[in-house]
Image (tube, rainbow, N blue to C red):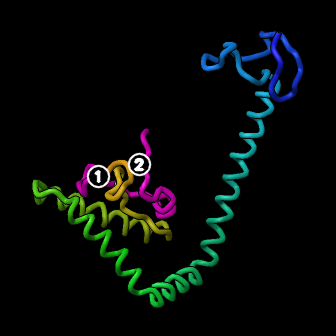
Amino acid sequence: MKTCFKCKLLKNFSDFYPEKGNASGYASYCKECNNEYAKKRRLNKDIKAKDSDKKKQWYLRNKQRIVANIRIWVKNNRARSNATKKKYELAKTKRTPAWLTPVDFERIETQYKLAEILTKLHNEPWHVDHVIPLQGKKVSGLHVPSNLQVIKGGNNCSKSNKFEVQ
């Protein structure tokens, strides 16, 4: 017999899922409570997807205002904006190895052209992203064709300087 952590009822071991990491060898929650929790998580994913669509629609409705506000911020914070841009450009320059061939530089340029075309085609920003970031906390990548990918701007901004192991 084992007590469920959530409903606090004493139940048979057959009412629990096996779990290796737990001292008793079984999960802390009974199957009933676990299934209820899973349903809530699935619902939450649906809600997040709907919220994401709402955010996207809001952005599209307010895009001109957002861009205008960004321009004003850059104008009022010119030094900070320039410093950030220069820091990124220097990091990219330092991370571009000398052994790259002209073909590699063409491939890099093609990635940027693709991002520009997708931006015009989909009417939303697309960015060239470094899979392994140039200025990551744990790892630093190189500015080479194999480390570049074209992704939606929102995904790139949310990724920031994180390296996600897949």
Left or right position of 62 against 133: right
At horizontal 41% and vertical 81% (from top left) the residue drawn is 80
Measured along the vertical axis of the image, is residue 102 above or below residue 70?
A: above
Looking at the rendering, the stretch of residues picked out in magenta corresponds to 140-166
Q: What residue type is labelled 2?
A: Phe
Which residue is at the front of the view, 152 or 11?
11
The answer to whether 62 appears left or right of 79 in the picture is right
**Label 1 to label 2: alpha-carbon separation:** 10 Å
Look at the picture and state if 38 lies above or below 63. above
Q: Name the amino acid type tagged 1.
A: Gly
The image quadrant of residue 84 is: bottom left
Going 25% across and 69% down the picture, which residue do you hit? 90
The residue sitting at 45% across, 90% down in the picture is 75
Which residue is identified by label 1?
141
Give how far across and how far down residue 16 sits, in percent. 76, 16
Q: Which image quarter holds the N terminus?
A: top right
Quadrant where the image shows the C terminus: top left
Whether residues under marks 1 and 2 lie with C-beta atoms below 8 angstroms apart, the answer is yes
Q: What element carries label 2?
A: loop
The picture places residue 3, in percent across and down from the top left corner, at 83, 18
Q: Is residue 146 magenta?
A: yes
Q: Which mark is residue 163?
A: 2
Q: How crowded is mark 1: few (under 14 residues within 10 Å), some or many (20 or more)?
A: some
